[in-house]
Amino acid sequence: MSKVNMMNTYGRFDILLKNGEGTLVYDVNGKEYLDFVAGVAVNCLGHSHPAIINALKEQSGKVMHVSNLYWNVPQLELAEKLVKYSQHDKVFFCNSGTEATEAAIKLARKYGKVSGKPEKHQLLYMENSFHGRTMGALAVTGQEKYQKYFTPLMDGVQAVKFNDIEDLVKKMNSNVCGIILEPIQGEGGIISVQKEFLRKAKELCNEYDALLIYDEVQCGIGRTGKLFAYEKYGVVPDVVCMAKGLGGGFPIGAVMAVEKAAKAFEPGDHGCTFGGNPLACAVSLAVLKELIEGGVIEKVEEKSLYIIDKVNDFKMKYSLVKGIQGMGLMLGMVLMSNTKDFIAKCIDKGLLLVGAGQDVVRIVPPLNVSYQEIDKALSLMEEVLNEMK
Ligand code: PLP
């Protein structure tokens, strides 16, 4: 099977995957891999989960797509469920994380414009952040490597040092319509925001009438051990972006907002042909049912502590291991060096892992991963650590 027909956009591992079940995936030669990448924090219920398969089968036999010119039943049911389990009042559906960011940016801009102050259009974003690859999202992504070939980028944005309250206060002003941040920076290296920083951001947004936007595309939907990462912090944003885990592997994204923010949007302001299509929404409903009512999320914290404990043991035993950071099943094992080598060796042994930021090995398995699978993954990692001694 030729690979030459694909555009050269990804630095891929040369593995051709064919099928998967639970936490396992198999390549075309039948080699088995334990999947601790989970589509980069997407496959929260693992591969081929029966609830997802059933939802796909059932809904595709009814109706897959209708336009947003009309209502559809799974869309309204999903919106109701999301509102019920969140602190937000309204939902907008899209298909991906970057689209969720775009919607949030546009909502903040419109919120600023309708305030009666035409120059209120500035967005503050964080250094080292990642919000997606489309031009709006890219403009608020604080990493030059993603931006450098695509300038000029959207105007009216300013970077703030992550977790630096002084810098945030310095840059906040009455022309700011929104502050966007990830509660846990994913691509940036699994770096958690500090509660004090969030509190200050919220206070400043209230003071200057701007929207506080959390990008929970990677850290949301149960990853932290709560449905929304903001529940871990107790600082509720005005707007929250989600995608990835929301569809458990089927593309769907969403933005939720509190009433005062949501009401800025009127018909014609924003839209998305496939956003909230019945098939995606039916799958998402099935995913949320498993995660919440099926008790998957409530077991995340315990699994997290189990992994953290073991990695702390690694730290005592192997000089390569510097520590562990993150929350729930969005963890990052920090190495002193040689991260690429470590990951390549793990993959060779049948454990899929991916890096994040500098020298961080991401540990983002399906949320329903078993302790036996965690033990297997940790023992493969330890084999590699021994080899790299
Ligand atoms: N926001 C965050 C925090 C992400 O981690 C990602 C993807 O990794 C995105 C946005 C973009 O999501 P997508 O690739 O679905 O556009």
Image: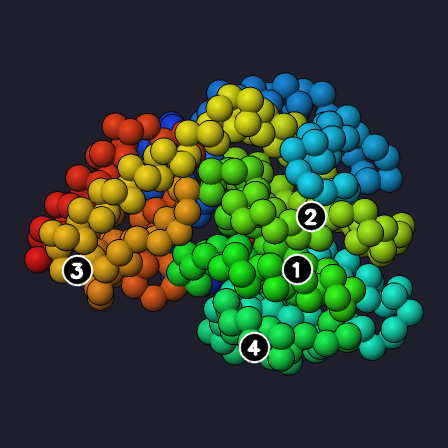
Of pointers 3 and 4, the one earlier in the residue sequence = 4
Residue at (29%, 41%) from the top-left corner?
A: 307
Query: Distance between the Cα atoms at labels 2 and 3?
Result: 40 Å
Residue at (75%, 66%) from the top-left corner?
A: 207
Q: Looking at the image, how many numbered discs can be counted on the residues?
A: 4
- Dot 3 amino acid type: Leu
Whether residues under marks 1 and 2 lie with C-beta atoms below 8 angstroms apart, the answer is no
Query: Distance between the Cα atoms at labels 3 and 4?
Result: 34 Å
Of pointers 4 and 1, the one earlier in the residue sequence = 4
Whether residues under marks 4 and 1 lie with C-beta atoms below 8 angstroms apart, the answer is no
Q: Label 4, on which residue? A: 167
Q: Return the residue nearer the eye: 68 or 75.
A: 75
Q: In the rendering, which numbered label is found on residue 202?
A: 1
Q: Is mark 4 within 8 Å of ligand 1?
A: no
In the image: residue 293, left or right of residue 153: left
Q: Return the residue nearer the eye: 207 or 61.
A: 207
Q: In the rendering, which numbered label is found on residue 255?
A: 2
Q: Return the residue nearer the eye: 275 or 120.
A: 120
Q: Position of residue 342 (x, y in %)?
A: 21, 56
Element on which disc 3 rests: loop
Q: Is residue 216 visible?
A: yes
Residue at (88%, 73%) from the top-left corner?
A: 117
Q: Label 3, on which residue? A: 320
Of pointers 1 and 2, the one earlier in the residue sequence = 1
Whether residues under marks 2 and 3 lie with C-beta atoms below 8 angstroms apart, the answer is no
Element on which disc 4 rests: helix
Mark 1 packing: few (<14 Cα in 10 Å), some, or many (20+)?
many
Q: Is mark 2 within 8 Å of ligand 1?
A: no
